[in-house]
Amino acid sequence: MTTQSTSPTKRNLVVLGGSYAGVSTAHYLLKHVVPQLPNKESYQVILISSSSETMCRPACPRALISDDMFPQEKLFVSVPQQFQQYPKEAFNFIHGKITKLLHGDRRVTVAIKDGETEEIEYHAVVIATGASTKSPLMGINHDSESLRASWNVFRTALPNAKHIVIAGGGPTGVETAGELGEYLNGRAGWFGQKLETPKVPITLVTADSKILPGLRPAIATKAENFLGKVGVTVIKNSRVASVSPPDAGTDTALTVKTTVLLEDGKQLEADLYIPAMGTIANTGFLDESLLTANGRVNTNSETLRVVDAGERVYAIGDVGSHARPAVHNILNTVPILCANIKRDLSIAAQVDSNLIGEDRLFKEDTRETQLVPIGKSKGVGAFMGFQMPSFIVWAIKGRDYWLWTTGRLWSGNHWSKAS
């Protein structure tokens, strides 16, 4: 059954996705865009998400071990509760899966949790659906309940694991290896170069010539040394050719014993296998004409408008092609995106062109910036091109994987002032 519960008299500003990019954009629109438009009462911000909760996704490598790692009320928060501060007529949250964006007809189709389908006409739409991970342990691929369920399955199997294989040498793979290594094996003493006889050997496999390809070789080497101290062995220049069973490490076979075959013919036997390589943009509801070759939304890298999608269609966050996936890129993008939305809405409302101004342009900061905790006390990284000492990485990120920052983001307090 198809319904249309949104008011036909409203100009709907629809935000697709309820994580960092979507929640931040919705707050910014409500605080700094809609109040400055003529006939502001005629606009409604609609946030659509498949999960009614959002969470601090970077914390997954540690959070997957136990609920005791983080206060759960801070790790997971209710999205609708974060928007109770706004008038009911100004905001609407829809809990459902986005099934289609028909940019020609300017409407979105949503499969609601109760089984119904809802169609929403949009005056403007922001695609902020992010990306999914192959492993269901590393974020909200479906909803928060399914993430918690995956963690519970993994935690039940973990005490019986004799060997763990993690595929992927990026931050997620390295952080997961470091967290599991320290939790299961402890850490080598001050003078120990490597934990020689770990209780549970962990193997990290990367196709690259080094781990952490976004950082300089010296930092990658430092990270590999830290991993060695918690019982992690790194295999480089070796891509995973296949796994048996083929769905090992995914929703359907999360904790099965797995044979991992590498391209060089080497075979690894794992009690637990975690595929931590790359992400897949959540764009299955979009027409292929709006996508790049790698499946991300074809986004103007300066204005954040979606190419060839018609008027007032935008993309932000990991789903877009305008920048590499990173939380700091999202935070830098929100004010620019919303300024351009405000400009386009003002033009549509026939505001005097002399009062509108020009587009704001986004330029990605491509300086070396990445912080990677390795266990609870160590870490490597760089910020704006400068290498960071281990204790600084711990102080900024390693203590709680950014949980100290997310409360202000989810509540919108981070966006209390326009920028």
Image (cartoon, rainbow, N blue to C red):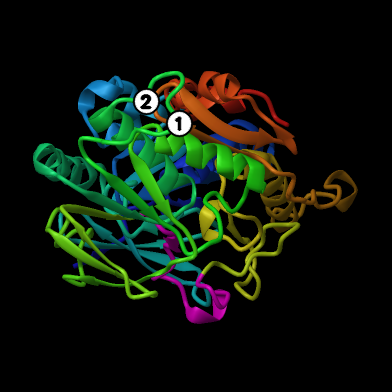
**Residue 273: which quarter of the image?**
bottom left
Please name the predominant secondary structure of the magenta segment in the image: loop
The reply to whether residue 383 is in sight is yes
Residue at image point 29% right, 25% down = 186
Could you say where residue 159 lies in the image, as x and y percent from the top left?
11, 36
Q: Which mark is residue 188?
A: 2
**Distance of mark 1 from mark 2, alpha carbons?**
7 Å
- The quadrant in which the C terminus is found is top right
Dot 2, how many residues are within 10 Å of its Cα: few (below 14), some (14-19), or many (20+)? some
Q: What element carries label 1?
A: loop
Q: Which mark is residue 193?
A: 1
Which segment is the magenta one? 276-295
Q: Which of the marked residues, 1 or 2, is nearer the chain's N terminus?
A: 2
**Residue 367: which quarter of the image?**
top right
Is 126 within the magenta?
no
Residue at image point 59% right, 21% down = 392
Vertically, is 293 above or below 7?
A: below
Determine whether, in the image, residue 101 is placed left or right of residue 140: right
